[in-house]
Each structure stands twice: as C-alpha cells, then as structure tokens.
Image (cartoon, coloured by chain):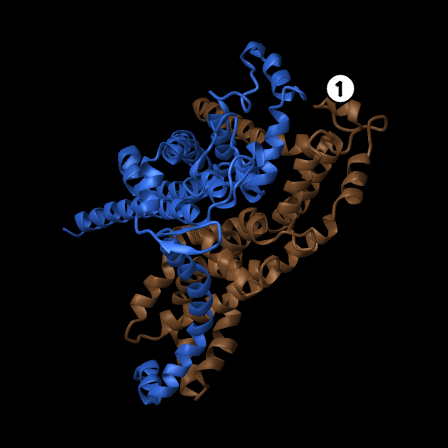
Amino acid sequence: MLNQRVQTFGVHVVLIAYSALAVGPILLVVMNSFKARNAIFGAPLAPPNAATFSLVGYAKVFGASHIGTYFTNSLIVTLVSMFLVLLFGAMAAWALTEYRFRGSTALALFLSIGIMVPIRLGSVAILTMMREAGLNDTLTALILVYVAQGLPMSIFILSEFIQQIPKDLRDAARCDGVPETRIFFEVIAPLLRPAIATVAVFTIVPIWNDLWFPLILTSSDSTHTITLGVQQFLGQYITDWNAVLAALSMAILPVVAIYVIFSRQLISGLTAGAVK
Amino acid sequence: MAEPLSQVVASMPRARFVGLMGLFLGPAVAVYTAFSIYPLIATMGLATYTNDSAGGYHFVGLTNFVTLLTDSLWSKPFWNAAKNNLIFFCVHMLVQNPIGIALAGLLSLPGLKLKSLYRTIIFLPTMLSVVIVGFSWNLILSPLWGVAEGALKAVGLGSLFAPWLGLPSTALVTLALISVWQFVGIPLMLIYAALLNIPDELVDAARVDGLGHLVLPTIGLVSILTFVGNFNAFDLIYSVKGALAGPNFASDILGTFFYRTFFGNQLQLGNPTMGAAVATVMFFIILAGVCLYLFIVQRRLRRYAF
C-alpha cells in the first residue's frame, strides 16, 4: 500500500517536472515581454510587477511592422485552405469508400502518396508555375499549395470516418429515391463534423505555422503570413529585446488561447486518428 | 432488402456514374495533381537540365547529380548536410522517441489523476510554430540574457554552461534537442493512443515483452514520421542560424542546403536546376526510408498470417 503511494508520488514528480520543462520556456518569454528592458535582464525569472511592467515592446511591434496585415493574411489562408481541404477531401473520401469502380484502388493509392512525400520537394517547379500563372506573391498561390498538401491526409482520415457511419442511413435514403449528390451533402456531410478536429490537427496547424511556402512564394509585406512576418521582424530587431519578446508573445498567445479552448477535442481527435 | 447501392449504381446510366465520380473526385484530384504530384515530377525533370546566363535551358542528363556527388565544390557541402541530417535524425530517435514512450507509459497508468492536464501541457509546444520555438530558445540559451546559465548555477552546474548554439561542436545537437523538446508530443500521443487501445486483460497477462509486441507497429510509424519530418526539416535551422546554417555550416542540413542552392545567398547565386537536383536526391532519401518501412511492415504482416 505504502509502496503504491510512493510510486504514484514518483510518477507525479516526473510528470510535473516534464510539464515545467514544456511550459517554462513559453512562460518565460511571455512574462518578460511585459517588462521593461532592465527588468528583463536584471531579474528574468521574476514576473512583471507595478515597477517593471512595460508595453514598450508591443508598441514597437505595432509601430514598426504590419502585424495586423500578417495576422489577417494567415487567417484568410488558413480558413480558406481548411474549408477546401475539408470539402474536397470529404467528397473524394466519400467517392472512394462508397463506390467501387475500375481504378478506384489505384486512385486511392495515388492520393495517398502525399501523406509521406513532402510537397516542399516540388518547390522549384511550384515557384515556376506560380510565376507563369501570374500568381506569384498572392495568397491564392499559398492556398492552392496548402490544399494540395492537406488533401491526402484529410482523405485518409475522412475515409476511416465514413466507413464507421452505419450503412442503413444512406440505404434508407436511396430507397426513397434521393439522388446520390443529395445523400452526400445532406445525409453524410453533417455527420462528419466530429472528424474536423482530427483533420485540423494534421492539416490546419501545419498551415498556420508554415514558414517555407510564404518564404518562397510571397515577397511583399501585404502577402506575408504571421509566421514569416514575425520571423523577418525578429531578424531585423534582434538586438531590441523588448520588441523581440513582444513579437514572440503575439505569435504565441492566440495559438495558446485556441489550443486551451479546443484542447479536449484536438487531443481526442489526435488519439482517435492515431488508432488506425 | 437487396443491396440498394449496387442497384442504384447498376441502374444508373454509365455517363451519369462517370459524371458523379467526376464531381466528387474531380476537385481533389485536380488540385492535388496540379500542385503536388506534377511539381514533384517537373522538379525531377528540371534536375536533368542546366541553365545558362541568358536564361536558356539545356538537357544534360544526370550530369547535375554527378556534379553534386563528386565535384568537391558541391559534394563537400552536400555530404556535410547529409551527415548532419543523419545526426539530427539520430538525436530524435535516441531522445525524443524514448521520452515520448516513457511519458505515454506514465500517462496511461490506470487511475492516474490530472492526466488530461499533463497531456495538454506536454503537447503545447508541438502546436507552436517552429520559428517561435527556435527564437525563444535562442534567447533562453543566449549568454547575453543568462537564463540558462543562471539555471545551471542554481543547481551548482554553472561551469557546464557554454554558448551551445554558437559553438561548431554543439550547435547541431542543441538544435536537434530544441526540436525534440517541441515534438516529443507526437510520439507521446501516438503511443498513448496505442496503449489505450490494448484491452486491460491483455496488459495484465502480457506484461513487458508482450506489450512491446503490441506497441511495436506504432513505434515503427513514429520512426518513419520522424524520418520524413527530419529529412525535410528547414524552418528551425533557418530561423535560428539563418540560411548559412552556421557556425561554418556546422548546423547545415539538407533542407537549408536545398534552400541555399535554389535561392542563393551572400556566397553564391541561386541555381534552380542544381536546386532541383538536391530536391530530387532528398526525394529518393525519403522514398528509401518509406519503402524500408513498408517492407518491414509487410513482412511483419505476412509473419502474422502464417
């Protein structure tokens, strides 16, 4: 009995220590972003107080960068990509799981190549294509690439999900003579809502956080995403610690807020997706 | 009730069925083919050309690959990046995955309290951008700020401190450990999910060796995901060390080498055809890893069948 208790205590000590290691650096950056310069260096581990509190870093970030534009761009790119990945992905997953036709297995295999092979390796040709199509330095170019990147994984996840939907649902509709397109959009699509969290973890988070494609496909401030914008700001103001810490915190806080709100769905989506 | 699906499909005119499949599959197949598969193939094609200063392209066969692998101007940085990439991968396999497995084991202990809180906190860094994580650690490890040094001094290990990110001997491993810190949540979650799916009776009966057997496929999956992710990594090195992956290319990996070759930098002009050749080599490295994984999985499946 005592042994059991000592063991449980030990497990908690290890988990608390690791949790501190995971969250400590993030906390340190956010905390110091609200402090004056001499307090950042004088007592890095102390939380801000009335004497050390300062927003000078944030004022610098807002004044010297187009952070609002970057944020809006990231939001547009991520949301439009997410919508298209889910729509096209669900339609394709439905066709591949519900109907059998010649070549359907080959097509499913073809679509799954992208799960393992990173689309980045085609960057040289992607840049040429976008230049020729006049899409260079547009958000459309980013969206097209991200939809292509996200589709294989979302088709895989949504196929697994569609297979678990009871067959009687669509068969009943078919007996009533409902056309196939309406069966998908009115019967099946609404049932896919719980799968969105899983798709989001695997395809949406990487889009928001991506540095590579904004770096090679966008060149002006008006098309930079938050990840690239902050990266360039940090490179430029590397010696201004207030500004750097504030820019880092502004990139961290929205993600942490959304993560904390949705963590239950995200993590259950992740573990559910991993089961297959 | 007969099979309604086959009835509906069988009674459907062929043209209508083709149209229906076109409607459902068309958008996904079109976007995926145009912006993922075609660029990959076109990049490999471009790798067999060379471009002159006037912008013309000439077919040169496999010359770019021979240059990349044998001309010391190219082969030295290439093999340096490949070697560093392998070290980067080994650090992940030796540190990230064992820690992930151990934490997953602890979290799946029956009756453990605060389980979901620990899970949420430990997975948090994985959600952040690599750029943000890289910069944050850059500050924390900086001798200017002195946080890491202070922390070591507090436990009496102050003499161990060094500007790890700045030294040629430690920069690469330090960057790999930052990446491990960020992505330990992925093996943790995958193994945790696998452990949850093992029925309790089996856990009691099988104990250690049997459990290993049941989790092995997930460890294989974690390994291949790590491999693909590492041999395609770029963001972390680029944001902490820049395109030159210093000091003196000590932290250069294939992703940063590809970027420099393709876009150029302070030292050289960008070269799209050599960049395409580097991307093609990276493609074959990743393909080899994936094939090895599929081969091993396939063999295991066959062993179970008999």
Q: Quick check: can you spot residue A276?
A: no
Tag 1 residue: A42
Residue drawn at the location 49% of the way across and 61% of the way down: A129
User: Between B33 and A252, which is closer to the camera in this rendering?
Assistant: B33
Chain where mark 1 sits: A
Circle 1 Cα neighbour tier, 10 Å, few/some/many (<14 / 14–19 / ≥20): few
Colour of chain A in the rendered structure image: brown
Chain in blue (letter): B
User: Between B258 and B48, which is closer to the camera in this rendering?
Assistant: B48
Occupied quadrant, residue B88: top left
Q: x and y percent of residue B175 in the render?
A: 50, 30
Q: x and y percent of residue B111 in the render?
A: 47, 38
Q: Quadrant of the C terminus of chain A?
A: bottom left
Indicate the amino acid at tag 1. Gly
Q: Say whether residue A271 is left or right of residue B155.
A: left
Q: Residue furthest left?
A: B306
Q: Quick check: can you spot residue B212?
A: yes
Q: x and y percent of residue B128 in the render?
A: 58, 42
Q: Is A51 above or below relative to B243?
A: above
Q: Say whether residue A272 is left or right of residue A245.
A: left
